Amino acid sequence: MNKNEEITEAIKEYSRKLFIDDEVELIIGFGRAKNGKSKPQIFWTKEDVDNFLWDENISINQATFTSKYKDKKIGIVAQGCVSRSLVVLINENQLKRENLVIIGVPCQGAYIESKNSLHESCLSCKYPMPVIYDYLVDVKPIEINSDPIQERVKKIEALSDKEKLEYFKEQMNKCIRCYACRQACPMCYCETCFVDVNSPKWLSKANETNDNGIWSIVRTYHIAGRCVECGACDRSCPEGVDLMYLIGKMNRDIKTLFGFESGLKIGALPAFSAFNPYDPDFFWDGESKEKESGKKEGGS
Ligand code: SF4
Ligand code: SF4
Ligand code: SF4
């Protein structure tokens, strides 16, 4: 048995037990699609369990589905980034820990067929192990010793302002504002998104570069200090807009400035929701007085 087969069998075993013991009403995971690959699936009965499948095509973030079932007792299969998403959602009062039963999976990464490689977020992943779980599948996670997102962020940081703007415009020209990136993100759970508000109207409905840029910038700020870098938004984009560099830059700035990484600890507020008198203040006076000591609880 390869690792994914081992994981699949362990998930089936845990899930069967959860249904038999009446511990959950549903389990969010992946099932076998007609093409033999995995697809996101909600499992409702112990008879469904045989269809569980864990493979390298885990391109969505399962935590996104929890908002639909938050009043139920949810079972969920969670690798590192998904468990971190659950932590953020618990911290933001979107989920109750006691309503969740988490089957933790040491992650093997999400594979992108067209690139014949793991997704950039997985190649840069620091937390393939689930950070919270009730049951844990006994396999080793992938070993990652790279950070291609960081490398690309650095390359873009080294460009002149004009070149940066050109790169940004080039990306925003590709955007068709389908909002698939929003739908794929567990942190984009607002009942009404600012783009759908007509009064005041923040953005035109027309697909044009400036408004596309505002969309991406505002979304990036909305997930600042909350994003777990699962890469689901980037993988969902039909136009190949480079979202990982925007998100990656934001995440790395939050870590450098506030010593904070999201989703690592229950009880830790997002960087922008917590005030710390030692937060760096060079935005205002041109120098960071307390940059080194500006860490928040829950940061690494
Ligand atoms: S980012 Fe990729 S490797 Fe890391 S936990 Fe998520 S799916 Fe797994
Ligand atoms: S960035 Fe991609 S997924 Fe998001 S709205 Fe634009 S085209 Fe759609
Ligand atoms: S913004 Fe993208 S990478 Fe970050 S949590 Fe949402 S879907 Fe994942």
Image (spheres, helix red, strand yellow):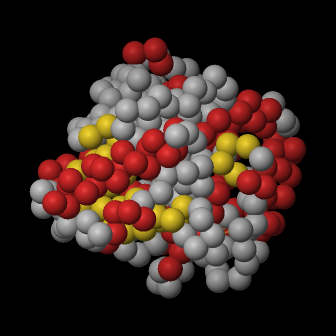
Up-down: is 157 above or below 38? above
The number of callouts visible is 0
**Picture coordinates of residue 255, whole percent (x, y):** 50, 29
**Residue at (64% x, 57% y) in the render:** 235
Up-down: is 295 above or below 104? above
**Residue at (75% x, 35% y) in the render:** 152
**Is residue 64 visible in this depiction of the protein?**
no
Quadrant for the C terminus in the image: top left
**Picture coordinates of residue 200, whole percent (x, y):** 49, 80
Relative to residue 229, is residue 216 drawn left or right? right
**Picture coordinates of residue 126, whole percent (x, y):** 52, 29
**Is residue 10 visible in this depiction of the protein?**
yes
**Residue at (78% x, 49% y) in the render:** 115
- Residue at the outermost front position: 1
**Picture coordinates of residue 7, whole percent (x, y):** 44, 44
Q: State the residue in front, 191 or 281.
A: 191
**Residue at (12% x, 57% y) in the render:** 21
Relative to residue 140, is residue 215 drawn left or right? right
Q: State the residue in front, 83 or 163.
A: 83
Relative to residue 73, is residue 180 drawn left or right? right
Quarter of the rendered image showing ligand 2: bottom right
